[in-house]
Amino acid sequence: MTSNSVASHPGQTAMLDRLEVKYFVDRTTRTALTRDLSAFMRPDTHAGNDGSYVVRSLYFDTPHYQAYHEKLSGAATRNKLRARTYGEAADPNTPVRMEVKGRFLSYIKKLTKDLSQDEYRAVETALRRRNLPPEYLLQDKSTIKEFFRLQRQYNMEPKILIQYRRQAFERMEINRTRVNFDDELLATRNLDLLGPLRGARRMLRYGSAILEIKVDGYLPQWLHMLIAKYDLQAQAISKYCYAVRSEARLSASGRADDE
């Protein structure tokens, strides 16, 4: 999936200006870092009373898991397709966000489009029947058309459903800066994005979280200082890859038990 990136597709904006880095943190580091971040940033306006919200994402890949292997090999240019919603029990009015995420090294270009749940069901049906969604959805000149272009080109299909709880901070200066703590990471092969979460298993150790820093542009100096203060070491963390590996281990164990 490296030859037709989002950034190079005709009609798209060829701008790779979003930096993303990830770290593992334990509970002690998270508590102290949260206190320091609160001096520079404000909680995400979409968070609940406890400062967090639930994210649920359906990831797509080829039959032979090309996106998974490109991530593991560190391919410099790659694309990701997913559908995302928010909340443990989806409100009928909560939109579904379709995403096409292109990466070049550590920089991200993401196209998004919010659909109503009825529109998403139409997309879901089209994917299941291996045809295109209603024509009016393809009038969108960027995300939905690009989503289906890549999906059909690489024969991508839903692979795994992942849910986690996110505590998010943001700050607007010249550029936008976001810092997220993601925990309670769960994964399942039950692929109903809008239905109950069935058969899900925990992916992270208790007390562990994934710290994500997302910056439109360059990392601000105060954030450099916090990274140095806590000796944070950037890692190539992929929730999707963790979930796929976990499912593979489970399948292998199941086959061994059955023999």
Image: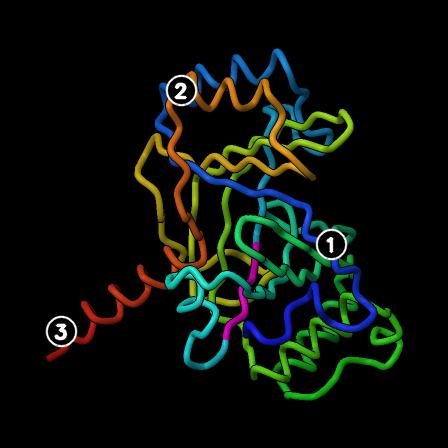
Q: Nearer the viewer, mark 1 or mark 3?
A: 1
User: Front-most of 77 and 166?
Assistant: 77
How far apart are the alpha carbons under marks 2 and 1?
A: 32 Å
Q: Earlier in the sequence, mark 2 or mark 1?
A: 1
Q: Amino acid at mark 1?
A: Met
User: Front-most of 59 and 232?
Assistant: 232
Q: Eyeballing the image, is 203 above or below 222?
A: below
Q: Eyeballing the image, is 158 above or below 221?
A: below
Label 1 belongs to which residue? 15
Position of residue 175 measured from the top left corner of the image (x, y, whole percent): 74, 32
Q: Earlier in the sequence, mark 1 or mark 3?
A: 1
Mark 3: few, some, or many residues within 10 Å (few <14, many ≥20)? few
Q: Amino acid at mark 3?
A: Ala
The residue depicted at 42 percent of the width and 56 percent of the height is 187
How far apart are the alpha carbons under marks 1 and 3?
A: 48 Å
Label 3 belongs to which residue? 256
Label 2 belongs to which residue? 230
Q: Earlier in the sequence, mark 2 or mark 3?
A: 2
**In screen coordinates, is 215 left or right of 135?**
left
**In screen coordinates, is 74 left or right of 4?**
left
Residue 79 magenta: no
Q: Locate residue 29: give its quadrant.
A: top left
Label 2: state its secondary structure: loop
Question: What is the chief secondary structure element of the magenta stretch?
Answer: strand
Position of residue 77 measured from the top left corner of the image (x, y, whole percent): 55, 64
Indicate the colouring scheme.
rainbow
The residue depicted at 57 percent of the width and 64 percent of the height is 80
Q: Locate residue 114: give its quadrant.
A: bottom right
Magenta stretch bounds: 57-61
Position of residue 228 measured from the top left corner of the image (x, y, whole percent): 43, 21
Q: Which mark is residue 93?
A: none
| Contact? badges 1 and 3 (CB < 8 Å) | no
